[in-house]
Image (cartoon, rainbow, N blue to C red):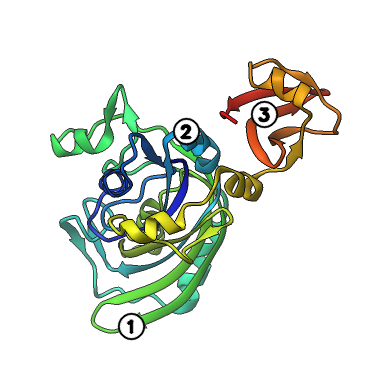
Amino acid sequence: MEGVVKVYKPILATSTECVEEVKKALGVRKAGHSGTLDPHAEGLLLICLNSSTKLIPYLLNLDKEYIGEAILGIKTNTGDRGGVVIESNLNRKISYDSLLEAIQDFKGKIKQIPPLYSAIKVKGKRLYEYAREGIDDVELVPREVTVYDFDVLYLIDENIQKFGFRIRCSKGTYVRRIIEDLGERLGCGAFLSKLRRVKIGPFDLEDSVKPWDKERLNQAILSNEEVVKKIMPVVEITPEEESKISRGISIKSRFPLEGEVGLFLNKTLVAIAEGKDGVIKPLRVFKT
């Protein structure tokens, strides 16, 4: 069994737990996901089965889209609702226009420091492990990410101000950190109270399946061919070319190809390759 499943990760489950549930439900030996969702987030998780785990690096590179909600005037130690309140400033009210103006600073290419409560590794250890041990002086290097769209959906001004948003961003973007930094920019603090991933590249939530739903999981598996056609250009190669590619040997390109490309033989995925300077070099080879 191979392929990719669009799984709906529920709140409080970890991404790793979802992978294990899928492995158990489908009886597969190997599986992996294409991008972590925090435990307090929900939504789309792409889980690759057996040899399809070769697709993970290419799925990881896809842009992500989220719908969420943030609380203004309160800060938590984790930046989301799973943390402990460390500061409260509920008397400062933010206007809709001020919110829209501040959000402009978080569009385009931005630098962000990863949250201490995250799965990024520093010196072989995940950041959340340092945080749980009370070590908060870990050197964190700012990373450049891109926010393509960041729109306010609503602003509710009751006892506690909260706003809804939709954001589309590049891989590696921490929405939690954006909300924290936005709170600092507004001078009131903020934390992420809800987050749902609704899209990964061309893949959306439609027909996504709970990780323990064996019957629906079996019906929802996308083939390697379906997935690759959605994320990169594809070309048909000849049997002679396939013979070389399957052995890891580069071939001369008959096409004006630059960058990643899916190589097919008789409509079956043979390899993911890189086209450059008239040469096609195999990067990941699949059994045919």
Classify residue 277 as left or right of residue 250. right
Give whichever of discs 3 and 1 has the lower sequence position: 1
The image position of residue 47, as x and y in percent, is 41, 46
The one nearer the camera, 3 or 107, is 3
Instruction: Specify the quadrant that holds the N terminus.
Output: top left
- Identify which residue is drawn at 71% across, 17% down: 244
Give whichever of discs 2 and 3 has the lower sequence position: 2
Give whichever of discs 2 and 1 has the lower sequence position: 2
* Pointer 2 with pointer 1, Cβ within 8 A: no
Residue that mark 3 sits on: 273
The image position of residue 245, as x and y in percent, is 68, 21
Q: Report if residue 42 is visible in the image.
A: no
Name the image quarter holding residue 249.
top right
Residue that mark 2 sits on: 51
- Identify which residue is drawn at 38% across, 74% down: 163
The image position of residue 111, as x and y in percent, is 49, 43
- Identify which residue is drawn at 33% across, 83% down: 157
Q: Secondary structure at mark 3?
A: strand
Label 2 is placed on what type of residue?
A: Ser
Q: Secondary structure at mark 1?
A: strand
Neighbour tally class for label 2: few under 14, some 14-19, many 20 plus, Cα within 10 Å: some
What label does residue 157 carry, if any? 1
